[in-house]
Amino acid sequence: LAGSRPLQHGRGSALRDVANRLRVRALRARGNHPTSCCSAAEIAAVLFFQAMRYWARQPAHPSNDCFVLSKGHAAPLLYAAWAEASFLKEPELLNLRKINSDLEGHPTPRLPFVDVATGLLGQGLGVACGMAYSRQVLRQGQVSALGGRPSLGQMAGENWVAMGGAGVGKLGEAWPGCDPTLSGQWVDPGSHWGENPGVLAHFCSLPGGGSLPGVEDAENWHGKPMPKDKVESIIGAIQSQIQTHEVLVPQPPIEDVPQISIAGICMPSPSEYTTGDKVATRKAYGVALAKLGAASEHVVALDGDTKNSTFSELFKQAHPERYIECYIAEQNMVSVILGCAARDQAVVFASTFAAFFTRAFVHIRMGAISQSNLNLCGSHCGVSIGEDGPSQMALEDIAMFRAIPGCTVFYPSDAVSTERAVCLAANTKGICFIRTSRPETPVIYPPEETFEIGQAKVVHKSDADRVTVIGAGVTLHEALAAAHELAKQGTHIRVIDPFTIKPLDAATIVNSAQATGGRIITVEDHYTEGGIGEAVAGEPGMVLQSLAVCGVPQSGKPAELLDLFGISTKSIIAAVKNTFAS
């Protein structure tokens, strides 16, 4: 990918000296990856002091060009560049990796010049593509990503996917840079960039700078700080090659882009569903997303080539310029959404089958470390999807997202609550996961019903209730059917829709348990481990029975599978009766 911005020439000596000063700073910081820092010094010098445009005193300004350090273990080089730009003070570099310092071993957004946390090799290019997508819509400058060979080459296949997606998206303002190490991540040359120009050579031919005597091209230096008895002599050798002390000042951005506001987005119209209508929550998600896109031009949607199943195609049809197709590459899709959400420039939603998010888990956890605001919708959850079989059935997703720090887990049970979940997610900090189902289920809430995060709904109750049943999605409807059948037999149960599994409305659950003799039954289209039952289990004063999917499922009709795995209306009735028998 070639950027179109013209570059200054005739600054080779000054840039070479900048590169050597970056090496010296990185070595003095005594990080664990000195060779990784030194090998990329020329690239960093060219990017920060020739190619990129930014205000050094305002690193997070929306007008600035963006930089993503994909090989995050070279963090001292990034910190050295910002010291050269006079944002960081030199003494701060000596606090690298200390408990009271924001200069961590791998970059995180605790620093204003870091948009996303890095350290997961291979993620940076996808993130940069996401930034470029959002900036393409907002017309806000260029994005540069720097990786080493293991993160930009064949060892991390998602980068090929990111490159392909960038080509399809015509992201001409994204510049990937490769620091060509010798043999994977374990050997980093001291100064081979000039000999192996790589992808940056099209705009600057800069010879390699200071070498590392006794270290360069040697095995077993990756991940080790430079020994004290070597570091000063190596620094001296590098400093002897510095010819000038010319200070290069970064060029300011061409345009002053104002900070936008993405807070307080509301649906432009009320829900149009009628109680009793049968609507799949996955379709309600697509309808709600398209409505949200009409409410704000800053809403962006992504999908992993499942748009006709997740119904994100409704957003694409209404707002094609803000839809990003990521194809069958969920890991890269999560990286792209991370980039889109950077600097609070967009409200982003990404959707696919909930089962497919499991292979993007490591990227999702990086989103939490990045303190990003991401909205992920997983459809086709549980055995209720039917004949497609176990490979498509998400049965671990609640557990996975409950484990993410600060994640909000929505599990809407009808079309109205799904629409409210989408709107709440758009205005919630952190990662949000919306779990949607394939079967059509009745609308149980009126259009004007209000919902809040962490607030459950008691959807069926009486003064004679003897057991509390908690269900969500399809199992809430199974629980309601069980309540009506049991009432005919003279047994009354209370039914709760939790709406969010994290945070869980403990107060409503405990109050209902107390009103029903402490007896609670949870029923869920999910594995036992990490699901609703385990979320409820921590509440005191209850006798809990959990109905969940045990064992690997199989193909079959949805009703047959709900029966087979003990989460159907019949199973709930039996569990209620067993509660009294025991």
Image: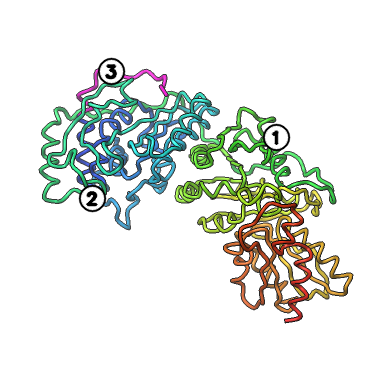
Please say if the residues under marks 2 and 3 sit with CB atoms less than 8 Å apart: no
Q: Is residue 58 visible?
A: no
Exactly how many numbered labels are in the figure?
3
Residue 349, quarter of the rendered image: top right
Q: Is residue 13 a member of the stretch shown in magenta? A: yes
* Residue stretch rendered in magenta on the structure: 1-16
Instruction: State the separation of the CA atoms marked 1 and 3.
Output: 49 Å
Which residue: 63% across, 63% down?
A: 550
Q: Earlier in the sequence, mark 2 or mark 1?
A: 2
User: Callout 3: few (<14), some (14-19), or many (20+) C-alpha neighbours within 10 Å?
Assistant: few
Which element carries disc 3, helix, strand or loop? loop
Frontmost residue, 193 versus 142: 193
Looking at numbered disc 3 in the image, what kind of residue is underneath it?
Answer: His
Mark 1 lies on residue:
314
Q: Earlier in the sequence, mark 2 or mark 3?
A: 3
Residue 203's disc is none
Mark 2 lies on residue:
224
Residue 222: x and y, percent?
25, 46
Mark 3 lies on residue:
9
